Amino acid sequence: MICQHHLPFIADRVIYLSLCDGNETPGQINLFFSYIASIAQFTNLQSLKLFNLCSHLILMKIVDQFHRLSNLTRLYFYSCNCQNDKADFQLIVNNIWSLPKLTYCYLDVGINKQENFCLSTKLSTSLKDLYMHRYNLT
């Protein structure tokens, strides 16, 4: 109820957002994104944590809006698995690397059993700490 009625009016003041589709909060991420038009509404967001995201549609919707999250410094994808090859891991990484203030990234995203990771075509000038789970560098 709070998200549905109040979140659109305070989104520009939110600096930390954590969403989880775990056993205790099934469907939370889908429900959350049904209440807002875009993650880009969170113009002052500094930290974003996503746990157990399984929808490639929502993943790509978030990633496509990264360029509008210019204050994001910390990004966490924990146990996010997309069993659909429509999610482009290279595009995800390129968009992450384009975040101008990002200093820390925890990346545990599985996409249709991809195991190889090609370096981004973009150069991050701010990223200091990166943790990648599941991938071999190629």
Image (cartoon, rainbow, N blue to C red):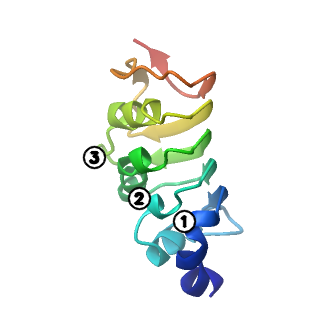
- Looking at the image, tell me whether mark 3 or mark 1 is earlier in sequence order: 1
Q: Amino acid at mark 1?
A: Ile
Q: Position of residue 37 (x, y in %)?
A: 40, 71
CA gap, disc 2 and disc 1: 8 Å
What label sits on residue 116 in the rendered view? none
**Quadrant in which the C terminus is drawn:** top left
| Pointers 2 and 1 in contact (C-beta within 8 Å) | yes
Pick out the residue farthest to the right.
Answer: 24
Other residues around mark 2 within 10 Å, as few (<14) / some (14–19) / many (≥20): some
Give 105 or 16, whichever is nearer the viewer. 16
User: How many marks overall?
Assistant: 3
Q: Position of residue 46 (x, y in %)?
A: 63, 48
- Residue at the spot of label 1: 29
- Looking at the image, tell me whether mark 2 or mark 1 is earlier in sequence order: 1
Q: Position of residue 12 (x, y in %)?
A: 56, 65
Q: Residue at x 30, y 43 (%)?
A: 85
CA gap, disc 3 and disc 2: 12 Å
For mark 2, give the secondary structure: helix
- Residue at the spot of label 3: 86
Q: Amino acid at mark 2?
A: Ile
Q: Residue at x 68, y 65 (%)?
A: 23
- Above-or-below relation of 17 to 98: below
Q: Residue at x 62, y 34 (%)?
A: 106
- Residue at the spot of label 2: 58
CA gap, disc 3 and disc 1: 19 Å
